[in-house]
Image (tube, rainbow, N blue to C red):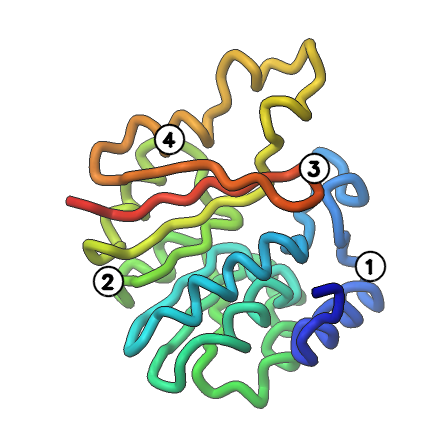
């Protein structure tokens, strides 16, 4: 499972050429980073089940997560991905030029997709700043649709003095949202995890 699908491999090569961080460590605290392979494979599994569906991604970057989903989604599925940075959006458009079912939108996350739902899958890779914004995203899911958020550190991998041990806003959003049934999925590297919720009401 170490081999990357061709479109994902091209996206990773693009990230390297443009200096876009491939890991959270490369990015540091103030820059976005790419979708990790473990997260990408998980998204690919979910996207493959979106028959006749609609997928949204907030935070395209240069298109690595987008590529994981576009490569497995059914032929009758469409994907909207939003990137606030015009240059990164342009790179992603070039990467995805051969995939007519995927549209790269330059804009602010939730606002840009609000009229395009309801969605079967939302990958909230950026643009969720507070509980209100998260609730708005959940409202864009159809019942049975799923929302995924990455860049979470498993509890056991957190430093002993991390403030996230007492209160992680992302975990709080998922746990306190009454319309979701949610869980945390630890990735194979054991240093990163995803939060995943299914809308039930």
| Horizontal relation, residue 151 to residue 51: left or right | right
Question: Outermost residue, front direction?
Answer: 1
N-terminal label among 4 and 3: 3
N-terminal label among 2 and 3: 3
Q: CA distance from mark 2 to mark 3?
A: 31 Å
State the residue position of label 2.
118
Where disc 4 sits, the SS reads helix
State the residue position of label 1.
19
Query: Can you tell which of label 1 and label 4 is closer to the viewer?
Result: 4
Within 10 angstroms of label 1, few (less than 14), some, or many (20 or more) residues? few
State the residue position of label 3.
30
Residue drawn at x 63%, y 53% as measured from the top left: 38
Of the 4 image quadrants, the one containing the C terminus is: top left
Q: Residue 160 appears at what percent x and percent y?
A: 69, 11
Residue drawn at x 59%, y 81% as measured from the top left: 96
N-terminal label among 1 and 4: 1
| Horizontal relation, residue 185 to residue 116: left or right | right
| Horizontal relation, residue 35 to residue 42: left or right | right
Of the 4 image quadrants, the one containing the N terminus is: bottom right
Q: Check residue 64 in the rendering and tell me which mark sits there, or answer none.
A: none
Q: Residue 48 appears at what percent x and percent y?
A: 43, 71
Q: Are marks 2 and 3 in contact (CB under 8 Å)?
A: no
**On the image, which quarter does residue 78 sit in?**
bottom left
Q: Residue 44 appears at what percent x and percent y?
A: 51, 66
Query: Can you tell which of label 2 and label 3 is closer to the viewer?
Result: 2
């Amino acid at each position: 499972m170490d081999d990357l699908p061709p479109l994902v491999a091209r996206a990773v090569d693009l990230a390297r050429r443009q200096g876009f961080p491939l890991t959270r460590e490369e990015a540091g605290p103030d820059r976005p980073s790419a979708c990790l392979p473990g997260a990408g494979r998980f998204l690919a599994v979910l996207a493959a089940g979106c028959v006749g569906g609609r997928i949204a991604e907030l935070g395209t970057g240069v298109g690595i997560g987008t590529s994981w989903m576009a490569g497995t989604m059914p032929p009758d599925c469409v994907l909207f991905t939003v990137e606030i940075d015009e240059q990164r959006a342009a790179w992603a458009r070039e990467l995805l030029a051969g995939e007519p079912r995927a549209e790269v939108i330059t804009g602010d996350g939730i606002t840009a997709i609000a009229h395009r739902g309801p969605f079967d899958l939302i990958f909230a890779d950026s643009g969720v700043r507070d509980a209100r914004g998260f609730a708005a995203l959940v409202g864009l899911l159809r019942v049975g649709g799923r929302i995924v958020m990455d860049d979470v550190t498993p509890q056991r991998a957190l430093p002993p003095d991390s403030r996230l041990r007492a209160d992680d806003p992302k975990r709080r959003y998922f746990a306190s949202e009454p319309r979701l049934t949610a869980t945390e999925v630890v990735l194979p590297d054991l240093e990163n995890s995803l939060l995943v919720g299914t809308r039930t009401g």
